[in-house]
Image (tube, rainbow, N blue to C red):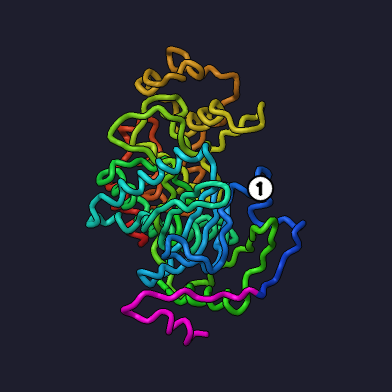
Amino acid sequence: MVSLLRRLSCPGRAWKPISFKSDVKRIPANEKIEEELFPDYIASRYYPVRIGEVLRDRYQIVGKLGFGASSTVWLARDLDDRRHVALKLFINSQSMGEQLDHELSMYKRISKSSSRHPGRGAVRELLDSFDVTGPDGCHRCLVHPPLWESLLTFLHRNPVRRLPIPVLAFVLRRLFLALDFLHTECQVIHTDIKADNIMFGIDDDSVFTAFEEQELLDPSPRKVVDGRAIYLSRELQMPKNWGAPVLCDFGSAVVGGKEHLEDVQPDIYRAPEVILEAPWSYQVDLWNAGCMIWDLFEGGHLFTGHDPEHRTYRSRAHLAEIIALLGDPPQALLHSGKSSHKFFTDKGEFRQNIPLPANVSLEGRETNLEGESKEKFLVMMRKMLQWEPSKRSSAKALADDEWIMQNM
């Protein structure tokens, strides 16, 4: 089998397509699997991928890597460039059209920016994009280098759900280099920094060859309904050499260089200016990063926004938690927010009928470190966790933070 793949991968010429077995394990048609388990699943929205087919006369599908409510992800062989790639095939949905065009425009903006910046390699690369026509409409396909697993998955491998200090420092160095590249070279604000949007690369091509061999020897189980095959995903084996982490997913990114008023960010990571509907810009990414860092290292959210009355997230509960940690917000920020009057009086007093949590401090909540290391870590955190956006450090300064550099 290995010799076959080597012959098909001769250097200096395009790869030839592989012939995959047609004798496969069938799953009963009435058994729901993978994307079918989503409550709003509609089969016709998904492109009916077939293992072995070649898209755009170039990308041969090898196997399914994963799935989601809006896309499926496949390992493919780039026959022209003789390498493996990941294809993200989106559902056919009129409501997603504008969003997909927007995401593609962000990737194109990034690709046109300086390749010499040290953060360029810390941002996921888009290799190609195209539309493919299925029986029920058109589907956008994005082509990326294959990645291993997300930081969130990596975190869950640790029983205590906390990143070790050297790993955290390395990840943060890469994250801040990526954000500096996006902010200064691309004029892009990410707005959605979270552990499942940071993924590790793969510096070990043997995992792709092994994936092919497994598919050839033991084809992926599938079910066929109305001529449409739905496959079980196959995991890549653990690489011998992991690549550095990269920042992914630019579906929520926006162009910087101007002030925004959109409601962005995951609820618990929302910056104060976003909650108050004040103009925001690049600094929302730094607040977002600070909240995520706390999750990764402390094993729990810094803010939850859990409202005891409504028993779900509410902006008033989130603001109450920020006040308990950072004190009262500055008047300048309140004056700039469209919604400030809903939460604060003209004098800056919190007016919501909700009890403020007991005053807390970062020192009191940080439990992993001691002495000088703890002090320097909290200094870094305070560079991001500031009411006023102008008082937050830049991504460039944070990439060289003393705590990060000492623990690399």
Q: Which residues are magenta?
A: 1-22
Return the residue at label 1: 38
Q: Position of residue 396 (x, y in %)?
A: 28, 48
In the image, is 111 to the left or to the right of 367?
Answer: left
53, 249: nearer the viewer: 53
Location of residue 319 in the rendering, given as x and y in whole percent from the top left corner = 50, 28
Furthest toward the front, the residue is 135
State the SS at label 1: loop
Of residues 300 and 367, which is closer to you in this image? Answer: 300
Q: As drawn, is 107 to the left or to the right of 341?
A: left
Picture quarter with the C terminus: bottom left
**Quarter of the rendering containing residue 407:** bottom left
State the residue lying farthest toward the bottom.
3
Residue 341: x and y in percent read 47, 15
Rendered residue at 73%/64% (across/down): 27
Q: Residues within 10 Å of mark 1 (few under 14, many from 20)?
A: few
Q: Position of residue 275 (x, y in %)?
A: 47, 28
* Residue kind at label 1, given as amino acid type: Phe
Q: Nearer the viewer, residue 261 or 290?
A: 261
User: In the rendered view, would you say 152 is above or below 387?
Assistant: below
**Residue at horizontal 52 percent and vertical 66 percent from the top:** 53
Q: Residue at x 41, y 65 (%)?
A: 58
Q: Is residue 157 magenta?
A: no
Give the total of numbered labels. 1
Secondary structure that dominates the magenta span: loop
Is residue 290 visible in this depiction of the protein? Answer: no
Residue 10 shows in this picture? yes
Q: Is residue 9 magenta?
A: yes
